[in-house]
Image (cartoon, grey):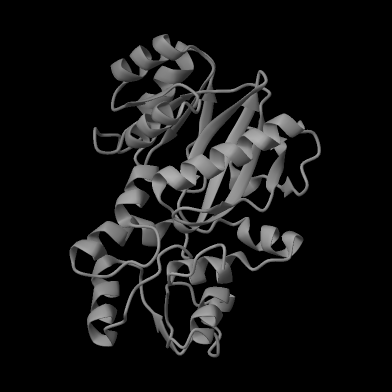
Amino acid sequence: MHAAFALRDEGFETIMVNCNPETVSTDYDTSDKLYFEPLTVEDVLSIYEKEKPEGVIVQFGGQTPLNIAKELEAEGVKILGTSPDTIDLAEDRDRFRGMMAKLGIPMPESGMAADVDEALKIARRIGYPLMVRPSFVLGGRGMEVVYDEDMLRQYVTAAVDVTPERPILIDRFLQDATEAEADALSDGVDVLVPTVMEHIELAGIHSGDSACVIPPVSIPAKHLATITDYTTKIARELGVVGVMNMQYAIADDTVYVLEANPRASRTVPLVSKVCGLSMARIATQLMLGTKLKE
């Protein structure tokens, strides 16, 4: 909604593509045109060819638009803001881990397995307990903590549709860790991190099921400074233009990066409300070429 309003204020006609008729963004006065269509490459392309827009924003629709951004770009669609290659760098665990190593930022040890033997090999290298989950689902479905070889064998054997293209993700489980998140705005050079959020539940509960608070209650100032520093470095290295969400875990006096989401997360409305700034509106202006300093 706020992105559509920001575009309208800048003199653009806005076209919303929505696959969920129940959301507030489907109000008839939010955008100039509204399509109820599935968010697939084919459907979005047909709308693009009909409307011929100046660009497409994929940062405000959750994970689905990010998944199709690269294919849309390959078909000639202009993606505004963060580039599809940057999105791929953040989403590809191997590429992202390489970038963290380059920046000297710690991540929990991890691996990907397509069968029981590969999973056991990774487990011997990392050690138990482990966080295991499918690589192709959202919302934490299928996520489990395993404590020994028998549990791991059972999990991998029961996992459906596991292939080299759709492996199981295996991470070292950080016990009794505190989880934190940070949303950032970036123009590709300058970065603003308005605040850090602390999760009430311990790490291991999916962030969609975990409540968080601003300001943080128990995270020491040095770790808050580290989270802000890491978020700034990662946004710059990725070349994010718009909004980004970072997830962290703090264990044994160390801040670990869990993942980077180069899009608006569910926390954006909370940060916007508490900090008194419209993250979606500012992110949209950044995608249109405005600099953060302005």
Relative placement, left or right, of 192 versus 221 is left
What residue is shown at x 46% (from left), y 88% (from top)?
A: 11
What residue is shown at x 73% (from left), y 64% (from top)?
A: 273
Q: Quadrant of the N terminus?
A: bottom right
Instruction: Give the image location of residue 34, x and y in percent.
Output: 43, 85
Q: Residue furthest left?
A: 75
Q: How many marks are shown on the rendered structure?
A: 0
Relative placement, left or right, of 157 versus 262 is left
Which is nearer the eye, 4 or 147?
A: 4
Res 204 seen here: no
Q: Quadrant of residue 80?
A: bottom left
What residue is shown at x 73% (from left), y 60% (from top)?
A: 275
What residue is shown at x 61% (from left), y 31% (from top)?
A: 249
Q: Quadrant of residue 91?
A: top left
Instruction: Give the image location of residue 20, x and y in percent.
Output: 48, 72
Instruction: Give the image location of residue 168, x and y in percent.
Output: 37, 31
**Residue 149 versus residue 201 in the image, above or below:** above
Q: Residue furthest right?
A: 217
Q: Quadrant of residue 38?
A: bottom left
**Residue 251 versus residue 51 in the image, above or below:** above
Relative placement, left or right, of 222 versus 119 is right
Q: Residue furthest top?
A: 124
Which is nearer the eye, 141 or 69?
A: 69
**Residue 34 versus residue 283 in the image, above or below:** below
